[in-house]
Image: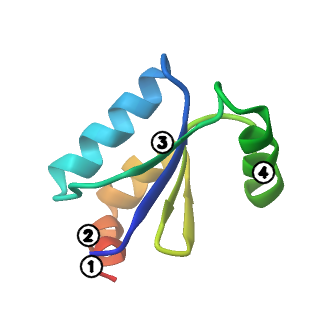
Amino acid sequence: MSSVKMFTTQVCPYCVRAKALLKQRGVTQIEEVRVDLDPAARDHMVEITGRRTVPQIFIGETHVGGCDDLIALDQRGGLSVLLAG
């Protein structure tokens, strides 16, 4: 299974929703980067994604985007394929 990295904040409901969907799809480990605790991490997130909102989700080397992007990918059947690597 591909690695999953997610830029998050503590109180983000979209982050919670994205994590729940990933767990439903069999993801047991998510590397979380808390941008609310580390301004440098937020700057890095913006630099590599061009986005300021959380979550920002990476599966393997692929930037999936935010929660809505993750849900859309799942609905198209692409999430399982991407997770399988």
Marks 4 and 1, Cα distance to the nearest angstrom?
27 Å
Please report whichever mark, 1 or 3, sits nearer to the chain's N-terminal start.
Answer: 3
Marks 2 and 3, Cα distance to the nearest angstrom?
16 Å
Task: Find disc 4 in the rendering and name its residue.
Answer: 44
Task: Find disc 1 in the rendering and name its residue.
Answer: 84
Label 4 amino acid?
Answer: His
Q: Which callout, 4 or 1, points to the residue nearer the camera?
A: 4
Label 3 amino acid?
Answer: Asp
Q: Considering depth in this image, is 29 or 65 the residue closer to the camera?
A: 29
Q: Considering depth in this image, is 29 or 62 the residue closer to the camera?
A: 29
Marks 4 and 2, Cα distance to the nearest angstrom?
27 Å
Please report whichever mark, 2 or 3, sits nearer to the chain's N-terminal start.
Answer: 3
At horizontal 28% and vertical 50% (from top left) the residue drawn is 22
> As displayed, is residue 20 above or below residue 63?
above
Image quadrant in which you'd find residue 82: bottom left
Q: Secondary structure at mark 4?
A: helix
Task: Find disc 2 in the rendering and name its residue.
Answer: 80
- Tag 1 near tag 2, CB within 8 Å: yes
Q: Considering depth in this image, is 38 or 43 the residue closer to the camera?
A: 38
Task: Find disc 3 in the rendering and name its residue.
Answer: 68
